[in-house]
């Protein structure tokens, strides 16, 4: 669906990625395995693999992980896997990720007013 001129610009456009992942799964007859349960479990596994890269790093090492030749490719691969599974899960569930992100950013702005939380990492109790 083409946005109208009154619509705000999209923050996230994953339509091409969703189509590519669907085609990849269809070509392999894997769609039958792509239930929300299975996809969310696979997503969790990939997030775990990403976390494993950073597990014993210092904060400074973690900041440089994507530039360090020893870890850069692994970081890229796991981030890609996380994104692919996230987009596939949203597609299977019919969730518009752009709308979901916009809604969540608005809710977070209400929950964490900048003038009240600036510089604090404490969780909101609102």
Image: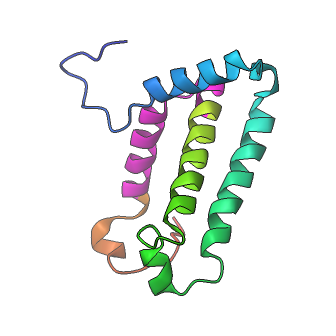
Q: Is residue 18 above or below residue 107?
A: above
Q: Nearer the viewer, residue 110 or 65?
A: 65
The residue depicted at 39 percent of the width and 40 percent of the height is 102
Q: In which quarter of the view is residue 85 placed? A: top right
Q: Is residue 22 left or right of residue 108?
A: right
The residue depicted at 65 percent of the width and 77 percent of the height is 55
Q: Quadrant of the N terminus?
A: top left
Residue 126 drawn at (x, y percent): 51, 64
Q: Is residue 69 left or right of residue 88?
A: left
Residue 60 drawn at (x, y percent): 45, 85
Residue 100 drawn at (x, y percent): 48, 37
The residue depicted at 73 percent of the width and 42 percent of the height is 40
- Does residue 52 show up magenta in the picture? no
Q: Is residue 61 left or right of residue 24?
A: left
Q: Is residue 11 above or below residue 118?
A: above
- Does residue 103 show up magenta in the picture? yes
Q: In which quarter of the view is residue 71 placed? A: bottom right
- The kind of secondary structure the magenta stretch mainly shows is helix
Q: Is residue 19 left or right of residue 119?
A: right
Bounds of the magenta segment: 90-110
Q: Is residue 63 above or below residue 91?
A: below
Number of numbered discs visible in the structure rendering? 0
């Amino acid at each position: 669906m083409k946005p109208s001129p009154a619509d705000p610009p999209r923050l996230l456009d994953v339509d091409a990625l969703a189509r590519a992942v669907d085609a990849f799964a269809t070509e392999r007859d894997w769609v039958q395995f792509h239930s929300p349960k299975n996809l969310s479990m696979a997503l969790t596994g990939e997030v775990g693999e990403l976390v494993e890269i950073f597990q014993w790093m210092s904060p400074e090492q973690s900041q440089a992980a994507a530039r360090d030749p020893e870890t850069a490719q692994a970081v890229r691969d796991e981030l890609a896997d996380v994104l692919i599974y996230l987009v596939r899960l949203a597609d299977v569930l019919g969730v518009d990720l752009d709308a979901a992100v916009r809604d969540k950013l608005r809710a977070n702005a209400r929950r964490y007013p900048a003038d009240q939380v600036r510089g604090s990492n404490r969780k909101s109790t609102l």
